Structures are given as structure tokens and as C-alpha cells.
Image (tube, grey):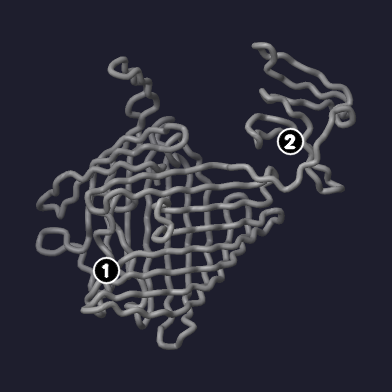
Amino acid sequence: MVLADWEGSYDLYVWDIDKERLYHKLEIMGGIYSPTVTPDGKYLAMSVYNNGGWDIFIVKEPFNQLETRAMGFELAPDWVFGKIEYSSYGGIYTRLSLAFSDILGNHRFYVDLDNPSDLANSNILFIYWYLPKRWDWLFYFSKVGGYYYNYRYGCWTYLRMLGISNAFSYPIDRFHRVDLWVGFVDVKEEMYLAKTYTQYYDLLDIRTSYVIDNTLWRSTGPAIGTRASLSLEHVIPIQPRVASATYYELDYRHYTRLTARYSWANRFIFAGLLSRQLYHYTPLWIGGPDDLRGYDYGEFSGYHIGVWNTELRYPFIDNLKIAFPLPMYLCNIRGGIFIDMGFATNNLRELRLYENGRLKDLKLGFGTGIRMNFGYFVLQVTCAWHTDLVSYSVPYWYVSFNPEF
């Protein structure tokens, strides 16, 4: 017997082990709380909100006398996530994420759209998880498109990728797991020279990852623990005119609790692409509020990137009450002071971090910001600058609706 709020209020559900069926035991509008069954199963005590107050009810022979309703395959929303960002470089960016599952969590669906008002040009992600066993299986469909600068031909190029994948995930224990992906990708590439040239090719994509996550969260983001992933991906072209490529990524994040309300967050990202024909593949981008603050969105690109973020997170305003012009009460507003460093290059041997008394390929940003949890989203307002250790930029302002890294 389990207590769950799957249909909007807490209620009792019973799982029949022999028949492998789920039964809905009660249907009380206000929900029930703190249900307790005696060891012999003859009595059920529970707390119910009744006639304007809390009362304790006792049911005799709960598994026999209460009516049950067998439940079939039914889905309910787990969460809905929306994100809106604005920058002077890229304008308005919107994102919508939806997740649904059944009450036992055996089947889960996930949909992710950016710019959902324009589906033809939107990036789309659909995932189905099959989760009743210890190992997990998922089906994955994606449509991703975007522009990048093609260094071989000296022109802007539009790249569209349609992908279908199967993946398996095996949890070693509660905090560690291994993932394996095998997928097929159809690629369309349009190069804008004197006239538009279009080419198509197909890829077989194989990826494996090792993941660690034992973090504990505050209201705005992780506060204690470690999150890390090491991924290797190999792309095998079906057409021989395109060379294969190997993608690597290390993403390591550690959160140190300094006091009960202060924490220190660090993130290291090192990723790159190896191939004899790199121009057939999209470079990696950094810049903006998600990785390198103090710069425009995607200001730097290359086939190898590195990022280090270090941030002190602290309580900023505990309680703020405004009477005019609109009555408003805000609480638990948190702040952060950060330094971001990163690079993007096409050749690690040609990387020059520092030269002639100033930073060259190494980019440095710093700033501060506030974060507030509004229940359905986390609001971040960030102000950042960049510097080469000789001069400083004008401030960059970012407004985003997503948790801290």
C-alpha cells in the first residue's frame, strides 16, 4: 500500500503482487495523510481534513471493506518547465519541457521544444522511458537545427539533424550509473556562398557515459555533493566520403557546504571533437549565461572547449515586503558572486592563453546576480563583465528562468 498525490490529492493505492495490478483504494477530495496500518492488517488509521478541521478516522478490515477501483494505464503530468531568455545578441529565446508518467513510474514520457510557436524551425526532443526493471530502456527522437561558420569554405552554414536512438541505462547503485546509446542521424547541410549548396549524409552514432550524482538541492540549485559525467561518442558515416569522428566530454561539478546557508560551487567542462575531416561536423560553442558569463551567446566556437565556473552562493534577502504600488512579499532571495574562465579553439597545440601582458585565447568573466524560486521556475538576474586583465567591458545583463548550474 502506498500514499501518492498522483491525481491531485494524497490517496491510497494498493499494488497486487500476484496479479501485478494497481488498485485505487479511496477517493477523498481533500486527500488523506499519515495512514498507518496495524501489524495484523486489521485496522487503518488516517488523518483527513473534514468540516474545517483535521480528524482521525479508523477503518476496520481496510483491505476487504473499502471499495477498490482497478487502474489501467493512465498518465499524469510530473512537471511542466518553461524558460524565457532575452539578450541583445539573440533576441527572445523560449523553451517548453513536459514530463508525464504512470503512478508506478514504469513508463515516462518527455517532450522538449524551443520556440514552440514555430514547430517547423523548432528544436524538438521526444523521449520514452521503460523503467519497470533495474536496467532502463528508452526511445529517443530529436530534430536539431542551427547555424555555424564553416571554416573550410568560409561561409555560414545551416545544419539540420534528425535522430532516432535506443539507449540502455544500468544503475550500479543509487548514485552511479552507466549509459549506452545507439542511434541513426540524418544530416542536411546548406552552405551559403554565391548560391546555396545542399548536401545530405547519414551517420551511425554510438555513445557511452559514466554518471555520478549525489547532490542535495536548495530552492535555487544544488548545494552539497558531486555531479559528474564522462562521455565518449563515436560517429560512423554511412557514406564513405565523410570521415568518422569521436566526441569526448568531461563535466565535473562539486558543491561545498561552507555553512548552513553558504555554499561554494565549481564546474569544470572539457570537451572536443577528433576527426580527419572536422569541417563536416558542427563546432562547439561557449558564451552567455549558461557557461561563460560576460560575453554574448555563443560568441566563441571551436572543436575543443574548456570552461571553469567558480561561484559563492549566499543568502541575499530573507524577507522583502512591498506595500505600494502592488502589495508583494518575497522571501529567500539568494545571491551569487562568480568568476568564469574558458577557451574555444580548433587546435589545442595553437592555444595561447596569455600573451603580451593580457589574456588572449583564455576568456575571463566575472559578476554577480540574484536568484529567486517562484515555485514553478527559478528566476535569475545576472550582471557580468569580461576582461583581458588590461581593460574591462561594459556590463552584460542576463535574465533567465532556470536553476543554478
Question: In the image shown, does 8 or 41 lie closer to the viewer?
Answer: 8
Mark sitting earlier along the chain (2/1)? 2
Q: Is residue 76 left or right of residue 369?
A: right
Question: Does 49 appear above or below 25?
Answer: above
- Element class at badge 1: strand
Q: Is residue 284 left or right of residue 60?
A: left
What residue sits 54% from the left and 68% below the top? Answer: 164
Residue indicated by mark 1: 345
Crowding at dot 2, Cα within 10 Å, few <14 / some 14-19 / many 20+, comes out as: few
Q: In which quarter of the image is residue 363?
A: bottom left
What residue sits 37% from the left and 69% below the top? Answer: 272
Crowding at dot 1, Cα within 10 Å, few <14 / some 14-19 / many 20+, comes out as: many
Q: Distance between the residues labelled 2 and 1?
A: 54 Å
Quadrant of the frame with the N terminus: top right
Q: Which mark is residue 11?
A: none
Question: Does 191 appear above or below 361?
Answer: below
Q: In this view, does 268 lie to the left or right of 31?
A: left
> Could you say where residue 382 lies in the image, as x and y percent from the top left?
28, 40
